[in-house]
Image (tube, grey):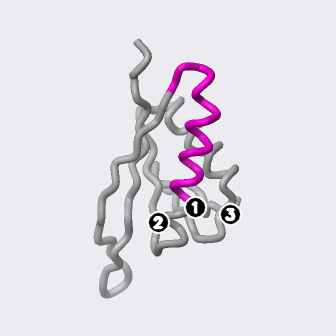
Amino acid sequence: MTAKGIDGGVLRVGKNAKILSIAGEVIAGVSAQSAIVLETVGAGAVNQAVKGVALARRQLEPEGRSLAIVPEVVEVPLGHGSQTVVHLTVVELDIWS
């Protein structure tokens, strides 16, 4: 998978990640638990992650399900320093009941 895999409940998404793969992981994540976190570094990765969530939402819509994204800027330890990443927490909305 080009979406770099899940580590501790966080899916790392790169700028070359396949949108369909991200969508599948998002659907699986919100179906198995209440939320999934997409970790991105850079504008290209954020773009791919958001498009993946949009595709997942479109696929869930016929079932009466919808998604929302909660963004957060996080400092992640890296060697002797840290790196700024964007966490996109994807949650399922209960808007149809």
| Pointer 3 local density, CA inside 10 Å: few below 14, some 14–19, many at least 20 | some
Answer whether residue 25 is magenta in the image.
Answer: no
Q: Which mark is residue 40?
A: 2
The answer to whether the residues at label 2 and label 1 have Cβ atoms under 8 Å apart is yes
Look at the numbered disc 1 and give the secondary structure of its residue.
helix
**Residue type marked 2:** Thr
Q: CA distance from mark 3 to mark 2?
A: 13 Å
Q: Position of residue 54 (x, y in %)?
A: 56, 45
Magenta range is: 48-65
Left or right position of 28 against 37: right
Q: Which badge, 3 or 2, comes first in the chain's sequence?
A: 3
Q: Which mark is residue 87?
A: none
Q: Position of residue 96 (x, y in %)?
A: 44, 17
The answer to whether the residues at label 3 and label 2 have Cβ atoms under 8 Å apart is no
Left or right position of 2 against 89: right
Q: Which badge, 2 or 1, comes first in the chain's sequence?
A: 2
Answer whether residue 52 is magenta in the image.
Answer: yes
Q: Position of residue 84 (x, y in %)?
A: 34, 75
Q: CA distance from mark 3 to mark 1?
A: 11 Å
The residue carrying mark 1 is 48
**Residue type marked 1:** Gln
Q: Which badge, 3 or 1, comes first in the chain's sequence?
A: 3
